């Protein structure tokens, strides 16, 4: 079997883990008077230890995480100091996550198993509705038939398609409320095209399901249409589908 090349996300996760470990190892190394070989080789590095250590004095950037006393009753074994070093390492790791824009989807792609729930590795294609379970009408459909399709589909919406099944819009429960509130009479609305939302948000079937969650949360929507490369409808899902799949 061909070995899969590590992704950028996987490299970042490994780097974050290594940062916390490296922080503790450097502390122990410095605390016990070990050599400091990094500066002579021309490398820049940061230290997160008490100012009195040789490592802190050699560092380009020093973050003081020293403690007045160890938790050890004899004040000898590194205890409180190692905890402080780990906490600072974790803080730096989280800051790096934020600075790089690392998302749940990136984590899911790069995390093989561990404590990450297996459901977070599912793709949209694994949880979306297909075929006859997708509510859809043509763009020239009547307003009444669109309402019937919303009721039949049970997703709180219907896709609006052209003759080649390309998505032209979406008509949701929210669109219905806004249409009725803005119209003198419901009978004035003849075609679904009059009240649908054009250019709706869509997602590809190969995307991670957690990406669908993020897209819904970002745009404050409850339904998503799934399209292929040609923009043709291949699936649909709403937040309840993601709840059932335990993605959220």
Image (cartoon, grey):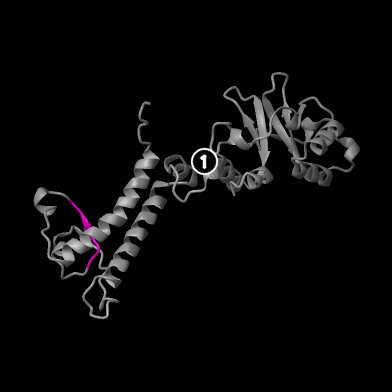
Question: Who is closer to the viewer here, 242 or 143?
Answer: 242
Vertically, is 91 above or below 242?
A: below
Instruction: Using residue 122 as the reference point, say whether residue 135 is left or right of it.
Output: right
* Residue at the (14%, 52%) spot, across then down: 38
* Residue at the (26%, 60%) spot, across then down: 24
Instruction: Using residue 53 as the reference point, say whether residue 160 is left or right of it.
Output: right
Q: Magenta segment: does it hold 57?
A: no
Question: Magenta segment, which residues?
Answer: 44-49
Q: Residue furthest top?
A: 164
Sort mark 1 into few (<14), some (14-19) or many (20+) by Cα contacts within 10 Å. Answer: many
Find numbered disc 1 in the image and state the secondary structure of the residue it sits on: helix
Q: Residue furthest bottom?
A: 73
Q: Give the dominant element type of the magenta stretch: helix, strand or loop.
A: loop
Residue 82, image x and y in percent?
Answer: 28, 67
Residue 9, image x and y in percent?
Answer: 39, 41
On the image, numbered disc 1 is attached to which residue? 121
Vertically, is 35 above or below 52?
A: above
Question: What is the quadrant of residue 232 in the picture?
Answer: top right
Q: Total of numbered circles in the picture?
A: 1
* Residue at the (36%, 26%) spot, across then down: 2
Residue 31, image x and y in percent?
Answer: 17, 67
Instruction: Using residue 89 as the reference point, say whether residue 44 is left or right of it.
Output: left
Question: What is the quadrant of residue 147 in the picture?
Answer: top right
Vertically, is 109 above or below 193?
A: below
User: Which quadrant: the N terminus?
Assistant: top left
Question: Who is closer to the viewer here, 102 or 33?
Answer: 33
Question: Who is closer to the viewer here, 180 or 241?
Answer: 241
* Residue at the (12%, 61%) spot, across then down: 34
């Amino acid at each position: 079997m061909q070995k899969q090349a590590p992704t950028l996300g996987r490299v970042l996760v490994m780097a974050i883990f290594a940062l916390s470990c490296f922080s503790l190892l450097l502390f122990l190394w410095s605390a016990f008077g070990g050599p400091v070989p990094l500066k002579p080789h021309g490398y820049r590095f940061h230290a997160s230890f008490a100012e009195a250590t040789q490592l802190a004095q050699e560092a380009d950037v020093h973050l003081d995480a020293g403690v007045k006393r160890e938790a050890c009753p004899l004040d000898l074994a590194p205890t409180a100091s190692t905890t402080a070093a780990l906490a600072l390492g974790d803080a730096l790791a989280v800051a790096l996550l934020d600075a790089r824009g690392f998302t749940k989807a990136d984590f899911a792609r790069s995390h093989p198993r561990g404590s990450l729930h297996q459901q977070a590795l599912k793709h949209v294609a694994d949880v979306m509705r297909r075929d006859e379970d997708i509510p859809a009408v043509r763009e020239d459909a009547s307003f009444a038939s669109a309402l019937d399709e919303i009721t039949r589909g049970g997703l709180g919406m219907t896709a609006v398609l052209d003759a080649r099944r390309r998505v032209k819009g979406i008509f949701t429960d929210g669109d219905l409320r806004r249409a009725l509130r803005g119209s003198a009479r419901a009978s004035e609305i003849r075609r679904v095209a009059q009240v649908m939302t054009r250019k709706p948000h869509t997602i590809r079937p190969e995307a991670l399901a957690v990406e669908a969650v993020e897209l819904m949360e970002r745009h404050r929507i409850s339904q998503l249409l799934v399209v292929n490369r040609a923009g043709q409808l291949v699936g649909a899902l709403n937040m309840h589908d993601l709840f059932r799949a335990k993605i959220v």
